[in-house]
């Protein structure tokens, strides 16, 4: 199998589709190292609710960008992009293949496509006013305001991620232009290829339900209670993630555990539909495979048959 120079390979797809195990088997066969492209996996002590690869799984193949921050630290897109580029360089220096794995579409494309963030500088007063507005009307209502002025930006931001919603609105109000139109793109320095994993929607939803029930059985409520007891506030962006905010509400006595599980299942379905905005089956840059037993062998055979790698600097419009 010929792997081009400065190559990076990505495995993407919705939550619970089966990326972790498929990527592990591929990495073992390709002498690759996994670079996580999942914004939930950056944070220490947040293991169960993020479906973080286990210690045993990480022992099989080197992993990067997992457990790199505390729950009250903020890892922005720009911080991630710099860290990912550094990790890719180190993997290349060892003569290995960087295998980018995850479902955070914006973070993946930022690395794969050489995104350059908007040049608009932060405005502390405007940001504080937007944050206060968000606290007054709620995260979902604030996100709906963004959807009115910049639908493309809103489609790529989960409404619970108030920090990113505020940043997008800040750029819009400062510049008078849509945030989504100000994302620059330089030539990618990598030769790159993206594999997508999919499942029938009913099957995917069943896997999501099973995963959430297993998280609860494995102690998600206790994990959240431990984070809160250590002084991490439930209003932190990290603890607003699906699973953590519902369990925090259980700890506060606002909802029952059964209602929290039901909310997690509903919100994860919404999240999966939002992920589809980033991973479209019509995207010519993504080569899709149905996740099933042995799919890694199908992918490896396809890779051995001279697949269409994108050369450094080359772009394909979606």
Image (cartoon, helix red, strand yellow):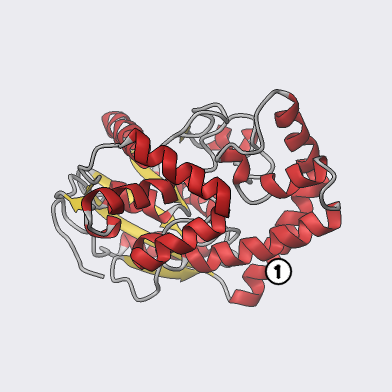
Quadrant containing the C terminus in the rendered view: bottom left
Residue 94 lies, in percent from the top left, at: 31, 29
Q: Is residue 33 left or right of residue 253?
A: left
Asked if residue 153 is positioned above or below residue 123 in the image, the reply reads below
Name the residue nearer the viewer: 297 or 10.
10
Q: Position of residue 168 (x, y in %)?
A: 35, 51
Confirm whether residue 205 shows in the render. Answer: yes
Residues 267 and 298: in front is 267
Which residue does the image show at 64% across and 62% down from the upper left? 267
Q: Is residue 67 left or right of residue 278?
A: right
Question: In x, y percent, where is residue 133?
Answer: 49, 48
SS under mark 1: helix
Residue 79: in sight, yes or no? Answer: no
Picture coordinates of residue 139, whole percent (x, y): 55, 53
Residue at 43% of width from left, 51% of height from top?
165
Circle 1 crowding by C-alpha within 10 Å: few under 14, some 14–19, many from 20: few
Count the numbered circles shown.
1
User: Looking at the image, is 291 positioned above or below residue 202?
Assistant: above
From the image, tell me which residue sits under label 1.
206
Decide: is 47 above or below 272.
above
Q: Quadrant of the N terminus?
A: bottom left
Taking the spot 62% from the left edge, 69% from the top edge, the residue there is 204
Judged left or right of residue 237, residue 306 is left
């Amino acid at each position: 199998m010929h792997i081009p120079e400065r190559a990076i390979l990505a495995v993407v797809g919705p939550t619970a589709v089966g990326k972790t195990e498929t990527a592990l088997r591929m990495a073992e066969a390709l002498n690759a190292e996994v670079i996580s492209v999942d914004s939930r996996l950056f944070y220490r002590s947040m293991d169960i609710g993020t479906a973080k690869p286990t210690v045993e799984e990480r022992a099989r193949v080197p992993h990067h960008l997992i457990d790199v921050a505390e729950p009250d630290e903020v890892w922005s897109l720009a911080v991630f992009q710099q860290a990912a580029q550094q990790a890719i360089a180190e993997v290349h220096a060892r003569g290995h293949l960087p295998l980018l794995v995850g479902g955070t579409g914006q973070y993946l494309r930022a690395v794969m496509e050489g995104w350059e963030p908007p040049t608009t500088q932060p405005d502390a007063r405007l940001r504080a006013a937007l944050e206060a507005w968000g606290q007054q009307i709620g995260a979902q209502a604030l996100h709906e305001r963004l959807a009115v002025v910049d639908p493309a930006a809103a489609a790529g931001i989960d409404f619970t991620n108030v920090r990113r919603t505020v940043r997008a609105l800040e750029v819009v109000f400062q510049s008078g232009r849509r945030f989504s139109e100000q994302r620059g793109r330089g030539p990618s320095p990598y030769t790159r290829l993206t594999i997508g994993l999919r499942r029938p929607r009913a099957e995917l939803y069943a896997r999501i339900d099973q995963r959430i029930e297993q998280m609860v059985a494995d102690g998600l409520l206790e994990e959240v209670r431990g984070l809160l007891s250590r002084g991490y506030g439930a209003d932190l962006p990290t603890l607003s993630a699906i699973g953590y905010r519902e369990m925090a509400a259980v700890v506060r006595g606002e909802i029952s555990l059964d209602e929290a599980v039901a909310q997690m299942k509903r919100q994860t379905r919404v999240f999966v539909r939002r992920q589809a905005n980033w991973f479209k089956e019509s995207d010519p840059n993504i080569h899709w495979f149905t996740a099933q037993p042995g799919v890694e062998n199908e992918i490896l055979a396809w890779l051995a048959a001279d697949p269409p790698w994108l050369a450094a600097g080359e772009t394909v419009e979606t």
